[in-house]
Amino acid sequence: MKAVDDLQHEHRVIELVLTGLEWLARRAQSEQRLNRERAERALEVLRNFADRCHHGKEERHLFRMMEARGMSRESGPLGVMLHEHTLGREHIRAMVEALPRAAEGEAAALAAFADRARAYAELLRQHIRKEDSVLYPMAKRLLSEDDAQRLLTDFEAVERDEMGEGAHDKYHRWAHELAEGGE
């Protein structure tokens, strides 16, 4: 099912950003400094690509379709995934809030940024494993070919109409740059 395969590919991109975020957290803790530009870039990719685009596709399209085919949105795998999306957004908000002071070298803000970055990366890595190994295989069994085609069309509309021309490519490029670490 191409739509679900596309979501799994997006997971690989998100994992690259998580690698970069973990690198930033280690530097913040060990060297008591934060590269503001790299941190801002990581947070932009996480907010726009991981959350707005990827989680948006799941929440507004995949999960709703699975719910229409009988899965509960309030409990079970969908309920867990939605809860984890909310937790992830809280971590991102806290990193965004700590960033200006952390970039100036404030010890408490550096610690807050690093703690939230590590917590977010751990949460999202576990979240991705659950989706890849449990939720997405369920979707492939539950949804019809017509459902799959509709999802693909909906996902393409999200990328085109909500994200805009070239956004996906930009975020993929940034993810690779972030994963490489370094200044």
Image (cartoon, rainbow, N blue to C red):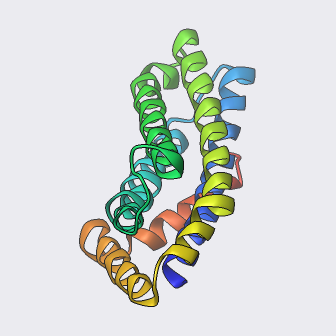
Q: In the picture, residue 24 is in which quadrant?
A: top right
Q: Camera-side residue: 144 or 152?
A: 144
Residue 36 in the image: x percent, y percent? 50, 35
Q: In the rendered image, is residue 86 in sight? A: yes
Q: Quadrant of the N terminus?
A: bottom right
| Front-lying residue, 132 or 80 | 80
Query: Residue 98 placed where, x, y %?
Result: 45, 22
Q: Quadrant of residue 144?
A: bottom left
Which residue corresponds to the image point at 60% horizontal and 57% vertical from the top-left?
A: 131
Quadrant of the image containing the C terminus:
top right
Image mark count: 0
Q: Residue furthest left?
A: 161
Q: Is residue 108 above or below residue 144?
A: above
Percent x, y for residue 97? 39, 25
Q: Is residue 178 visible?
A: no
Name the foreground residue: 142 vs 124: 142
Looking at the image, residue 104 lies above or below residue 175:
above
x 39%, y 89%: residue: 146
Residue 49 x, y percent position in the rendering: 44, 58
Residue 48 is drawn in which quadrant?
A: bottom left
Residue extending furthest right?
Answer: 30
- Residue sitting at x 53%, y 50%: 77
